[in-house]
Amino acid sequence: MMLSIQDLHATVADKEILRGISLTVSAGEVHAIMGPNGSGKSTLAQVLAGHPGYVVTGGSVTYMGQDLLEMQPEARAHAGVFLAFQYPIEIPGVSNAYFLRTAYNEVRKANGQEEVDPMDFLDIMTEKLQLVEMDEAMLQRSVNMGFSGGEKKRNEILQMAVLEPRLAILDETDSGLDIDALRIVAHGVNSLRRPDKATIVVTHYQRLLNYIVPDFVHVLVNGRIVKSGGKELALELEAKGYDWLIEEPAAVGA
Amino acid sequence: MSSAIDQLVSREYQYGFSTDIETDTIAPGLSEDVVRIISAKKNEPPFMLEWRLKAFRRWQQMTEPHWPNVKYPPIDYQGTSYYSAPKSAKPLASLDDLDPKIRETYDKLGIPLREQKLLAGVAVDAVFDSVSVGTTYKEELKKHGIIFGSFGEAVRDHPDLIEKYLGSVVPYSDNFFAALNSAVFSDGSFVYIPKGVRCPMELSTYFRINAADTGQFERTLIIADEGSYVSYLEGCTAPKRSTNQLHAAVVEIIALDNATVKYSTVQNWYAGDEHGVGGIYNFVTKRGKAMTNAKISWTQVETGSAITWKYPSVILQGDNSTGEFYSVAVVNNMQQADTGTKMIHIGRNTKSNIVSKGISAGRGQNSYRGQVKVMPRAENARNYTQCDSMLIGNACGAHTFPYIEAQNNTATIEHEASTSKIGEDQIFYLKQRGMSAEQAVSMIVSGFCREVFKELPMEFALEAQQLLGITLEGSVG
């Protein structure tokens, strides 16, 4: 078992968003987290990556036998946790190539591997760029500056391809993508599927799951997982929407 | 995030040691007699004494300017000594005769005063307490007809050049601190590049303040004759002391027709402690005059000093002349900076370019003050100004004071300004990619300053980045 989340509670600005989430992810699996807006999907992704704006108020997360919640965000990255951001951040004046190389070398250093020099790194990049159909010119541009929405998302997948994380969390990577970009992103993710790696795909729509086929689908409503199933659950959600799942707990409450 | 900023803010000042050395220091106080003593100690010709005295008389009628956006207690001009020199600082037959203590000081600062391969490509004039103590590569430069050495030597050996150009860009009456400097300056660097000569190495002056309770007044004069080129670097450090010390320097550059002068500064005077005790008052006048097709480019990285007050400027006198100003100014703790430039367009088709990056942390206050003036005859003058401020933390300030005056309606003047704050989200993004918080801040600040750093010669770019606690970006490729 790679990741075990037990009864996780978290707040942002004193408002409880996650209200008891339990989830287990094993190597080789792809899990989709679906749910309506405001259900806590992105919060779960941010909490797993260690964003300081979220406060964990209860529960536990074990990753590769370690207490993930005790680890600094960079230590989580070193241990192979990668978050593809819903809104990638712009860093003016820092070239994409330098940023990627620094990230790559930091992860290597933390794992006792030698740093890679810029020339060797360029070779690695050339291969990874093809995966997401990005031009080499992208490497010289400042990180995410002036990138279109689709370019930013592809840039996230490029980083993922370079860092080869053990656990990748894709936070609404499909939002704002046209069908071509979606296909490219999905191709990138699929070609990184390995028996020793796992992926959590957070999405509002079923559309992405036509391309990245999940092993498990979980529906998050009001900070709890209200239903889990196989890939067919995503199709059911596509047909029926989320309302039938939202009304259930409301009826219990009344 | 706060820990990264704290680390960045609380880095120890590495150059805070002082050297115990015998000095020839005159008693505190300022009068005509003091001016005469200084001139006599330097064996100056009568025209220099006359010039100093005129400056002194003018200074007495002037009042200290208080328009800069900085605050400090009144300066006691009679409580300061106006001349201090290492006793051993007489003209040296060779650098081997340099006082070992002074050599050791520069070694500790990482400026070896030996003509060795380590510093090949950079000639250094070392100024210790306002007195030039040694210049490297003099002979090599002489072969090209280049004069590089102390100001005092130049007054002795080339009085014609001094008399012709001294005060031609910054007159003694220019401002309060320039007048004071003109009256009492003790030494500094002098450069002359002959017609059509491209200076084969970087010239550099390394200023070191050592003595306590003395004012520091150097004067630098650079003359680039027609069609010549020179790149000049200036570095500065001072010991940690709990009292404030006044540093009022003047730099004049003359770029004759078709000449190019590039002047780079990494200013790292002692900044005072986190409570604002001690530190240098860096009140400096720097100005260049560019003749036809000439170009003067100022690049500065201002990280030190309790207070910085300086506006490296260009008078675009000749047609088609170009002025550039690239600046990174950092304030931390209680530091204050009021810095910027003046671009005075007089000739036709003159161009100026201003890029200013202000970084404020701790309780520092950072002001950009810039003037762009287009005179009536300056047809087709062009200026582009970009002025960016970055705030780190919640207790600092950034201010911008642009002054734009166009007296010719063919002028094109652009001014862009931005203010940003290092955000938690930016730092988190970089941490999620495996970087430490400190690395994240460094990377963000480094990116912010990139346009300025790329103007620095390589040796200085490294030093500048280190000063900012930054790992060098893009050093290869």
Image (tube, coloured by chain):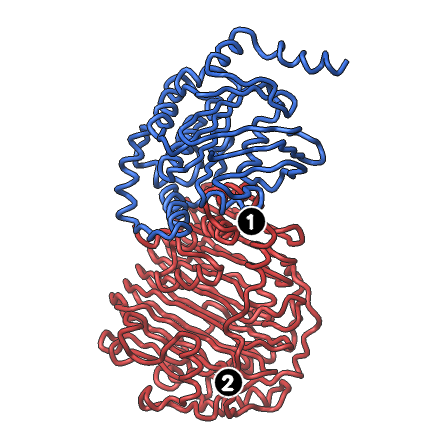
Question: What amino acid is at disc 1?
Answer: Ser
Query: For the point 35% across and 80% down, which residue is it?
Result: B113
Q: Position of residue A161 (x, y in %)?
A: 36, 35
Name which quarter of the figure residue B248 lies in: bottom right
Q: In the picture, which chain is red? A: B
A42 vs B199, nearest the viewer? A42
Q: Is residue B314 visible?
A: yes
Callouts 1 and 2 in the same chain: yes
Q: Residue furthest left?
A: B143
Above or below, A236 against A70 in this view is above
Q: Chain of mark 1?
A: B
A19 in relation to B451, above or below: above
**Mark 2: which amino acid?**
Thr
Q: Colour of chain A?
A: blue
Please state which of the two labelled residues, at mark 1 or mark 2, is closer to the viewer.
2
The C terminus of chain A - image quarter: top right
Task: Specify few, some or many for label 1: CA neighbours under 10 Å numbering under 14, 14-19, or 20 or more.
Answer: many
In terms of depth relative to the viewer, which is nearer, B307 or B292? B307
Residue sitting at x 53%, y 87%: B84
Q: Secondary structure at mark 2?
A: loop
- Looking at the image, the residue that sits furthest to the top is A239
- Cα separation between marks 1 and 2: 37 Å
Residue that numbered label 1 is attached to: B389
The image shows residue B372 at horizontal and vertical percentages of: 51, 51
Q: Is residue B414 visible in the rendered structure shown here?
A: no
Whichever of labels 1 and 2 marks the residue nearer the N terminus, that label is 2
Q: Which residue is mark 2?
A: B19
